[in-house]
Image (spheres, rainbow, N blue to C red):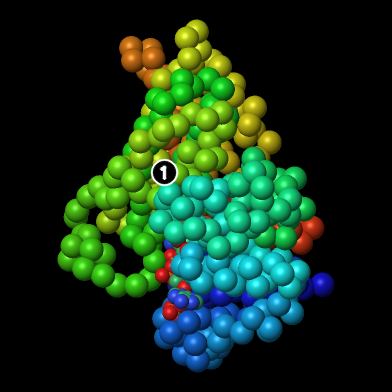
Amino acid sequence: MSHRIGIVGASGYGGVELLRLLDTHPAMHAEVVAAHSQAGEPVADLFPNLPGDRTFDRIEVAALADLDLVFLATPHGPALELGRALYDAGTPVVDLSAAFRLSVEGFATWYGEPHPHPDLAAGDPAAATDVAYGLTEHARERIAGARLVANPGCYPTATLLALTPLAPLIEPGSVIVDAKSGTSGAGRAASDRLHFAHVHADLVAYGAPAHRHTGEVERWLPGELGPVSFTPHLVPMARGLLATCYATLRPDVGADQVQQALHEAYDDEAFVHVLAPGIFPHTKALAGSNGCQLSAVVDERTGRVVATAAIDNLGKGAAGQALQNANLLLGLEETTGLSAIGVYP
Ligand SMILES: NC(=O)c1ccc[n+]([C@@H]2O[C@H](COP(=O)([O-])OP(=O)(O)OC[C@H]3O[C@@H](n4cnc5c(N)ncnc54)[C@H](OP(=O)(O)O)[C@@H]3O)[C@@H](O)[C@H]2O)c1
């Protein structure tokens, strides 16, 4: 049986990556590929990797509600309304935006507006029990029983995969994250900041000290380890994200405990690979995959752990993890249609 799937925002980078993944998925097919300004336009005009004469559909809630599952890959504003409508219709949703990731209070703080649907705010203690934050490796059971999954942001995915197993070993207030992403992280829309002539051969920080993903990391890092310092950077590459996370270790915690925590968390995982200390992850090794490579070293001189995680921002950082979560929601093998191995070189 092939599940009937909708992608809203299929004309964006997250949406088109879902479309590419579903093309070879054995148990799902993209029945609706909806776009906003691009509705009616040929998919191949925007994305030459998807030749053919398919055109983008209009966003129609009734048609979406009839499907087996819908991915929302739009900005958080439209996702708030579409997520509400589909949840009320009983249609499973995996939302790639930030609409449902935080608590009500966190959403107001980081997005500057009250959350219109407090019961769907996954980060809120009062959220409905069938709403989940989708960091798959750390929330499998809740995701499998959910009707709405808030897929994590790209920077929080890499950061939380690196730091969640280490959380009991870390001093509160000591976490600093220095992260870098390729330009597809900013979506398809052109801007001066993302113009080739600006980005090429450049490296620049942005968003510090209050990038919105800071709030997501603080909410989902176990053990109330915040506040967290987080600075993202824009790197002249299309895909790929590297998070280098620094934290002070609690007294008497050594390198062995750090390695043990990472291996206990991930040795049985299909998509998260722990590299030996001193072997550092490459973003390019994950391109096009749902993999995450991470490694950690302990700096005995400063008492800090330095944990580095690489992902494809459109893979494990967006569409790949969304598909991993959708597999769980639909009762399929979690790895179906996904690979941990990137395109290399
Ligand atoms: N890019 C990443 O690496 C990444 C990673 C994790 C999460 N995310 C999140 O995933 C979502 C999509 O990101 P993206 O990078 O794919 O963005 P994008 O390339 O800018 O695409 C945005 C999509 O949303 C549609 N859209 C825009 N305004 C809309 C509206 N008012 N109503 C309905 N649809 C609308 C666009 O349709 P038209 O093009 O037809 O106008 C397009 O299909 C965002 O919430 C983003 O924060 C992105």
Residue 234 position within the rendered picture, expressed as x and y whole percent measured from the top left: 29, 53
Residue 200 position within the rendered picture, expressed as x and y whole percent measured from the top left: 21, 60
Residue at 42%, 51% in the rendered image: 110
Residue at 34%, 72% in the rendered image: 189
**Farthest residue in the front direction?**
114
Give SS at disc 1. helix
Residue 299 position within the rendered picture, expressed as x and y whole percent measured from the top left: 37, 17
Residue at the disc numbered 1: 214
- Between 36 and 104, the one nearer to me in the picture: 104
Judge left or right: residue 329 versus residue 227.
Answer: right
Height in image: 23 above or below 324? below
Image quadrant assignment for residue 329: bottom right
**Farthest residue in the top direction?**
252
Dot 1: few (<14), some (14–19), or many (≥20) neighbours within 10 Å? many
Quick check: can you spot residue 254?
no
Height in image: 134 above or below 200? above
- State whether label 1 is within 8 Å of ligand 1: no
- Between 188 and 281, the one nearer to me in the picture: 188
Residue at 51%, 81% in the rendered image: 35
Total marks placed? 1
Residue at 32%, 57% in the rendered image: 237
